Image: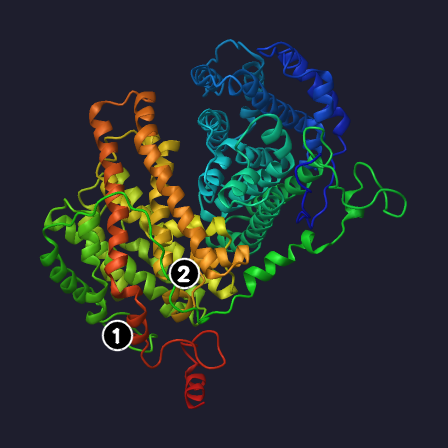
């Protein structure tokens, strides 16, 4: 019996099928036989695949559904790639996952990577069918694609192979990942980013290099990948969890983390799948057109981006239809309509005629949840639970002097000045700034800093916090996104990569950034400067992202919120300044390694989430915000604020435990894997220690700061702030004065 009933999937667009299906079936079967995949032995006897098994799994049908418009030769090649990737997955399972052979698995993966050669390189002779298949596919695919695409494809292929070690390590430890770690790692090990690369090949149009690294294009790939993986986890739960002993499955992850029944967890995973597809659609329809215009992408490349987006959509609907038919998965009861004459035509290629628009398939519940939030809802004080913090707090001896210098710098930059468009005069005043005591936060997260370093750290915190208050106050109420975008675009002028001259700054934000960049970037190397500029630009762009959601009255998708929260909080900037000082001493691939990525993001999530707990009333009740994880979980899970608060606290605990495990175990493994010298080991160990003090210092600052205390919030509500009667926001800007007068009289 199936462990749960498959849910009602959101799939509003029908699957189509490529007419070259039979040709691809014949070709891929012959190719698999030629590569030796149909006679590869299992360690305990028998073979990994035989002809009958390959026929039942029917990867040609998968590719014909997911790439309905490409020609015969292209479909043949794509089908061969999918035969290879599924064979690799099963071969690796038989050879190493059952036996827990970590050493043999690493050697296998290291040798397999040698077949992704650069121009002029000669691969070694294959020693198994996975190597033979990759060598053949590489030689047939790479010549027709650009160097930029090749690098993206190498990265995604590398990830899906190498990160299999993460799955194997979890099986060996009997460990189930926390939800955030799982979603991050599933993208790397699951292969859907790799599939997105092959969509470019199938549609004959690559993503233009000028926009390939932008957030909208990354979100398209990430949401596509998450939806593919979540769908696969639902269909494969029985085979992976119950039959193969796997523990990398979203249904299992949420089942254990939320302590719920398997059926409830499956429904939740499907709800998240729907949410990711909605995020894909919002990005494709709202943000990508603006991106193309902003980068002046020429018409033929715009067509290519459109073809790519459509190709990703075809993959979603086609992949669903294949999962519903393949013998590889449990799929009982997933048909779109009753069989028989009254149910309409049946069989391959008739899916469009059976598209029943049920509430689940339309995703109505998720749309209602996201778009019906009432701003400025009176929520009251949110009691913050006891939060685990094993790391001690230390404070710089230079704090007293730093506090006074911070006030002087803020006054000099204009943080206390009147700002046009802000009705009550300025964003801050000196009383409020002293109460925020950001110098105290800096003194705890950089306890060993010199006075000059402490001032710089505190001033960055002051500038980032001021900007976070400034953007919604100036642009949010008026829904003035164009002005916000112009203001953000101008900020890059004050971060020249050559550390040279800048235009005259206008206003406190530009004046503060110009001063900070001069003091920060001057001693940096060119690479460190680029990284620092990117971390600042990511943070300021996230303020505009918040305004876009506010304009749509759209509560963010949970995954998108968590990933963007690290940017809106300025986590990479504030925690990464010390790391940038050693950017030339540590090989760049180290910071891209899974261990360092999880170490950094686990610490960042802990700090971001604790801020959301402390700032809940301030943001939801007094500021009309919707960017708070407590609210995001309330909305997504349809629970009250206290239940959502407890889930946030549980996520913090899980991320902290993951951080501690990485420091105790994975760092040393990574040091040995790359044979790092003592100086680099010391730098990375100090980086982990800095993150400990960063987390403990931020928690202590929130406990002592007045910024989030209810009494201060109520005392800070001066006349002329907050929403007006009859409005969910306070109108501001040209032409709104009459509205404010009438509302005041009423």
**Residue at which label 1 appears:** 418
The structure residue drawn at horizontal position 50% and vertical position 28%, both measured from the top left corner, is: 160
**What residue is rendered at 75% in x and 29% in y?**
21
Residues 655 and 367: in front is: 655
What is the number of the mark on residue 485?
A: 2
Q: Quadrant of residue 404?
A: bottom left
- Residue 136 location in percent, x, y? 58, 17
Helix, strand, or loop for circle 2? Answer: helix
Q: Position of residue 246 (x, y in %)?
A: 55, 29
Residue 635 falls left or right of residue 22: left
**Residue 274 position within the rendered picture, expressed as x and y whole percent measured from the top left:** 60, 50
In front: mark 1 or mark 2?
1
Residue sitting nearer the eye, 41 or 509: 41
On-image quarter of the N terminus: top right
Which one is nearer the viewer's eye here, 744 or 548? 744
Image coords of residue 199 (percent x, y): 60, 36
């Amino acid at each position: 019996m199936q462990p749960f009933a498959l849910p009602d999937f959101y799939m509003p667009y029908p699957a189509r099928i490529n007419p070259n299906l039979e040709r691809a079936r014949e070709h891929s079967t012959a190719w698999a036989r030629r590569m030796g995949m149909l006679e590869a032995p299992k360690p305990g006897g028998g073979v990994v695949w035989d002809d009958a098994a390959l026929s039942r799994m029917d990867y040609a049908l998968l590719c014909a559904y997911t790439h309905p418009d490409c020609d015969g030769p292209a479909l043949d090649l794509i089908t061969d790639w999918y035969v290879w990737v599924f064979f690799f997955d099963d071969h690796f399972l038989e050879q190493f996952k059952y036996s827990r052979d970590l050493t043999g698995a690493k050697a296998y993966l290291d040798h397999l990577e040698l077949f992704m050669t650069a121009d002029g390189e000669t691969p070694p002779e294959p020693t198994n069918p996975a190597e033979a298949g990759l060598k053949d596919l590489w030689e047939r695919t790479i010549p027709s694609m650009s160097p930029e695409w090749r690098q993206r494809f190498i990265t995604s292929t590398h990830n899906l192979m190498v990160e299999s070690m993460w799955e194997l390590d979890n099986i060996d430890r009997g460990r189930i990942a926390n939800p955030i770690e799982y979603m991050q790692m599933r993208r790397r090990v699951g292969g859907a980013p790799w599939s997105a690369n092959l969509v470019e090949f199938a549609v004959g149009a690559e993503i233009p290099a000028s926009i390939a690294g932008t957030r909208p294009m990354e979100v398209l790939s990430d949401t596509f990948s998450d939806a593919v993986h979540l769908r696969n986890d639902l269909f494969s739960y029985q085979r992976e969890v119950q039959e193969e002993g796997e523990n990398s499955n979203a249904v299992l992850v949420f089942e254990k983390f939320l302590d719920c029944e398997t059926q409830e967890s499956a429904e939740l995973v499907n709800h998240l799948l729907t949410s990711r597809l909605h995020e894909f659609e919002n990005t494709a329809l709202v943000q990508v057109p603006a991106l193309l215009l902003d980068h002046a992408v020429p018409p033929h490349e715009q067509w290519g981006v459109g073809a790519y987006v459509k190709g990703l959509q075809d993959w979603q609907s086609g992949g669903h239809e294949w999962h519903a038919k393949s013998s590889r998965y449990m799929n009982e009861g997933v048909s779109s309509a009753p069989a028989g004459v009254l149910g309409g035509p049946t069989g391959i290629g008739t899916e469009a005629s059976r598209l029943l628009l049920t509430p689940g398939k339309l995703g109505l519940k998720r749309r209602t949840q996201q778009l019906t939030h009432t701003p400025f809802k009176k929520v009251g004080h949110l009691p913050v639970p006891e939060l685990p913090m094993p790391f001690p707090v230390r404070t710089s001896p230079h704090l007293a002097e730093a506090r006074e210098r911070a006030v002087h710098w803020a006054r000099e930059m204009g943080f206390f000045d009147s700002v046009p468009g802000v009705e009550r005069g300025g964003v801050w005043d000196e009383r409020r700034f002293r109460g925020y005591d950001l110098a105290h936060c800096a003194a705890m997260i950089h306890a060993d800093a010199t006075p000059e370093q402490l001032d710089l750290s505190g001033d960055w915190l002051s500038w980032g916090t001021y900007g976070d208050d400034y953007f919604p106050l100036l642009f949010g109420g008026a829904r003035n996104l164009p002005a916000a975008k112009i203001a953000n675009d101008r900020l890059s002028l004050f971060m020249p990569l050559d550390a040279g001259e800048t235009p005259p700054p206008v206003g406190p934000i530009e004046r503060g950034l110009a001063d900070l960049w001069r003091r920060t970037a001057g001693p940096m190397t060119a690479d460190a400067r680029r990284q620092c500029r990117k971390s600042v630009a990511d943070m300021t762009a996230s303020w505009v992202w918040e305004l876009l959601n506010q304009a749509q009255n759209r509560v963010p998708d949970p995954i998108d919120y968590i990933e963007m929260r690290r940017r809106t909080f300025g986590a990479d900037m504030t925690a990464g300044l010390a790391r940038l000082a050693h950017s030339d001493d540590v090989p760049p691939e180290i910071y891209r390694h899974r261990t360092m990525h999880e170490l950094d993001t686990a610490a960042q999530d802990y700090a971001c989430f604790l801020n959301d707990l402390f700032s809940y009333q301030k943001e939801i009740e007094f500021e009309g915000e919707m960017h708070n994880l407590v609210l995001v979980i309330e909305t997504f899970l349809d629970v009250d604020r206290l239940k959502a608060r407890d889930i946030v606290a549980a996520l913090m605990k899980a991320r902290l435990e993951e951080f501690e495990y990485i420091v105790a175990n994975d760092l040393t493994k990574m040091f040995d894997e790359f044979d790092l010298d003592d100086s680099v080991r010391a730098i990375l160990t100090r980086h982990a220690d800095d993150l400990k003090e960063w987390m403990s210092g931020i928690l202590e600052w929130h406990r002592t700061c007045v910024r989030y205390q209810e009494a201060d919030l109520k005392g800070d509500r001066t006349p002329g702030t907050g929403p007006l009667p009859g409005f969910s926001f306070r109108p501001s800007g040209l032409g709104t004065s009459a509205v404010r007068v009438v509302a005041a009289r009423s």
